[in-house]
Amino acid sequence: MALLEVNNLSVQLQTKTGFATAVDRLSFTLDTGEILGIAGESGSGKTMSALTLLGLLPQHAKVTGSAKFDGQELVGMTNKQWQQIRGKNIAMVFQDPMTSLHPMLSIKTQMTEHMITHLGITEKQALVDAEELLIDVRIPDPKKALSSYASQFSGGMRQRICIAMALACKPKLLLADEPSTALDVTVQAGILTLLNRLREEHHLSIIFITHDLGVLSSITDKLLVLYAGREVESGLTSTILQHPRHPYTQGLLDSLPQPDSKEKLLKSIAGFPPELGKQPIGCAFAERCKFAEPRCTGHEVQPTFAADDHKFYCAVDPFAFTESREVGA
Amino acid sequence: MKRNPDSPWRQPLAVIGVTILAIWVLVAIFAPLIAPSNPIAQNYPELLPPNAHNWFGTDSVGRDILSRVIYGARITLPLSIMLVILAMIVGTVIGAIAGYFGGWVDATLMRLTDVVLAFPGIILAMAVAAALGAELRNAVFAVVLVAWPTYARLVRGLILSSKNADYVTSSRLLGASTTRALFVDLRPNISGPVFVLAALEAGNGMLLLSGLSFLGLGARPPSAEWGAMVSAGANNFDKWWIAVFPGLAILTAVLAFNFLGDALRDILDPRTAKALRE
Amino acid sequence: MFGRRSPSEKSGGLRRNTLGNFIIRRIAIGIILMLGITFISFSVTQLVPGDPAALNLGQSAMSDPTIVAAWRAKYGLDKPVPEQYFIYLNHLIHGDLGLSQQSRRPVSTDLAEYFPATLELATVAIFFSLIFGLLFGIIAAVTRNRWPDQVIRFVTLTGVSVPTFWLSLVFFYLFYFKLSWFPSNGRLDPGVDSPSTITGMYTVDAVLHGQFALAWQALRHIMLPAIVLAIYTIAVLTRFTRASILEILNNDYVRAARAKGLPESLVIRRHVLRPALLSIVTIAGVAFGNLLAGSVLVENVFSWPGIGQYAYRSSIGLDLPGIMGVSIVVAGIFITMNLLVDIAYRFIDPSLRHG
């Protein structure tokens, strides 16, 4: 049994004009120890899907479909039930370490409070464990770090602390929402290496969310590409990177900097994703897609299976016969 | 709450505020037509409680309080608006100069605003009003003297935050003068918050002005100024109607300004709204 | 000035001296402000078109030029204006606020007598303000945009709109004259002797002397004016509390705390209220200064013999040393409060302490 089974999960958010679909019938599975990358531009619903798995959506959001974690249905859980899951079984690392640590509470308090709540251990024991966790994420002088405050650390160090904090209750699933985007490139690499190591040592499953396919290619096993709240392509990371079939995935890959490229300018995808709640019927990417044909919109696009574990939603399939890309990373 | 935050008219508080103010303005304009009696004529028996003829009763010298409250709108309302406009002009000019020129000009002007803000407002106003002589005009001057720093601070902050905005820089690069930068490029960013502050401050100004009159440092008898009328009630505190009605007049007018200002502040973007609170 | 450090900056090192430097700079600013205050106070006295001598000397004395000249010399009024300012400043530094032209006593002596009454009143008022301001503010923030919040918004707007002097009269009429819930004017019942002075605050002095019945009486007398005085501050603190809680609720770190599965009550108490309280304490320091000054109108109605009354009588009698004395003392307290609060804030808030 997979650790996480998501089936037809949809999220609707309340806006000024009514309900808008932020996540549209999303399905995927995640096994223990696996890393799933969710890729997409901002507004593609990737953060919303993560917040849904923690029950942290804004008020008045409607969630339908199913998300089974360890056999337990998450959709429709009460706040009390969520509190048992959050931080204990599913933990999250947020995008900006500068703002996700409390500026006025010591690292000690923030590291131990949920250990005390969830594990029922004494503060003393929690402190011992916290120190070990900080060593685990390579924080120098963990004793001093515990009695310090967020402002005394650099961004990279803060994110390491956030990761240690997330791992404190030995969760089975870690949601990492652009954990390295706000950091310098060199610091970023360190965080990725850390996550990869922790996954192996802790048998952790990770959902790694980012807009940067370059980052995903280096650490994920599986990929899920989202556009305007919908899946456009999914499969093994290596397969998708070698032979992307959806023009949007292709576009994301083209917009990555290539180390040996002669072209100085990065290719970007022209236009903007549709506004929340204004997704068309059919392919939402059609209006930005240079391969678009009239049949792309007006009715649902059916999935095409390139292989058992490679699925994409494009009626035109312009890359069916192109040769494999070289995988840089 | 489902309301379109872009339109002031969708804000119930703004609508209530504007309505009350409109009523008071109409009362002030048509006072001679509405008022049942001459506000300073001692036409009635003294200290009559509210009755069918004198709805708000009469005061200690037999004047009709309703008529005095109605005529009072002609004094307190325009004076409050005038003092707000004066304070706004003085404060905006000082804040704009400080923000635009920076350096020692800024430092000097801002220390000056700090000093005035550190002063207990009402006591400074009392001192000024007393020193100049207990007259309504001097009271207005005293309140302006106390009220301008809030605008100066706001305007300076707004200018500092938008001075280096791209469009201003490019306008300067194109050779636009300082005056142009201040009046054409920066003004639209500043006028909105300043008017909201003016709405919020109008109430405070009115309270301070009527407070001075209450203390005998503003309007003098037999003027039908609302604060002075409340003061007359203090001498006959068991005759509640003397003080209650003019006080309610002040309360409703100040409330109207505050409703309006509060609702307008909600419409502004959060950053300027924050600047207004500080 | 104290902008956030960029993430790449290393920690440590910056800790040294910043707090000390900050305190020194803050005190320097405080001194400059005080100088400004004295300058403005002095300038106000120069506005007087009337002749203070004429106001303070009788008709017959005015007709005698030698008496008038002697009177002017006594108050330094015969010197050139700039010199008068430095004379005044020099006296101030030595704690001499001049002679009250009404009481014929040093203003500092007068103020020492009147100030405790105001301090007592403002202390009780700030106590009320904090309790109700926090309570209503938290309720409003938690029920944001629902009916309790709307009601509180309406009530607080009314609270900042009501003329204090009028409300004093209305409360006096209702709660003393009609309902007799509270005793009449003044600090004690008529004919009752005040406790012998230790602090000058009757409730405190009576307790110190073990006169508990007297303390209770003093407390009953102070209630009504303190409540009226507190109304405006309650409204301001309510709105401020609501705003700061809502601002904190929007922070990423609150979402991060929820993501850790903490009970909501703990999230609110530890992650939201604690930082909110800090900024509320800041504003309460400022509010206390405003209460001291704002007591003028309340003291007038309740015949409360504090510095507000003193300032009122001084300004009516054109006793400029008197009103300048009150201004300077209140402004001095105001500036000191701000200074202390700022320093305390930097001690308590770790992100400022280290940044």
Image: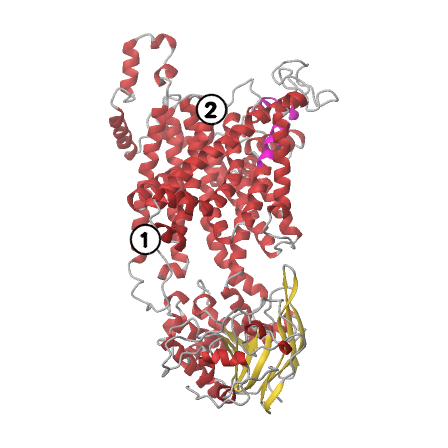
State which chain disc 2 sits on. B
**Residue A319 picture location, percent across and down:** 53, 86
- Residue type highlighted by circle 2: Arg
- Residue type highlighted by circle 1: Phe
| In-front residue for pair B106/C206 | B106
**Residue B189 picture location, percent across and down:** 46, 48
Bin the neighbour count of mark 1 within 10 Å (Cα to Cα): few under 14, some 14-19, many 20 and up. Answer: some
Label 2 belongs to which residue? B137
The Cα–Cα distance between marks 2 and 1, rounded to whole angstroms, is 43 Å
Bin the neighbour count of mark 2 within 10 Å (Cα to Cα): few under 14, some 14-19, many 20 and up. Answer: some
The secondary structure type at the circle numbered 1 is helix
Nearer to us of marks 2 and 1 is: 2
Quick check: C94 left or right of A252?
left
The secondary structure type at the circle numbered 2 is helix
| In-front residue for pair A252/C62 | A252
User: Which residue in the rendered view is the most extreme toward the bottom?
Assistant: A308
Label 1 belongs to which residue? C22
Location of the C terminus of chain A by quadrant is bottom left
Confirm whether the magenta stretch covers residue C81. Answer: no
